[in-house]
Image (cartoon, rainbow, N blue to C red):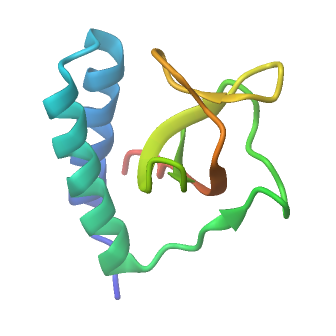
Amino acid sequence: MKIDKQLLGDLISDFETVIEMKVDHYAYLNLMDRLKATLEIYNEEWISVEERLPEKNVYVLANEEEVNDCLFLFLNHYGAWQNEKEFYFGVTHWMPIPEKP
């Protein structure tokens, strides 16, 4: 299936807005639902944290099993998973966020 670059570009732009403006929790959850639905359509490959880790301080989409959800997180310079508000300890898999088209 061919990836809809416009759709992915819109999702990435929305994500950047959420991060920069620190918009409310509901906007973040709505964006996560849209991104998860898009990724399910295109069946992207998840990378196990046992296989390899992302670059430090770069946001990725992470599967966090303790909250049973996918979240935008980054691996900080100490090797801990976090976003701008919280730390997470149950990350099992991750995938890069696609670049804008």
Q: How many marks?
A: 0
96, above or below 20, in the image:
below
Residue in the foreground of this view, choosing between 39 and 69:
69
63, above or below 48, in the image:
above
Q: Quadrant of residue 74?
A: top right
Q: Quadrant of residue 87?
A: top right
63, above or below 20, in the image:
below
| Residue 34 shows in the view | yes
Residue at x 44% of width, y 79% of height: 43
Where residue 4 sits: x, y (%)? 26, 68
50, above or below 98, in the image:
below
Q: Is residue 84 left or right of residue 55?
A: left
Q: Is residue 73 left or right of residue 52?
A: left
Where residue 41 sits: x, y (%)? 30, 79
Residue at x 76% of width, y 36% of height: 55
- The N terminus sits in image quarter: bottom left
Where residue 91 sits: x, y (%)? 64, 49
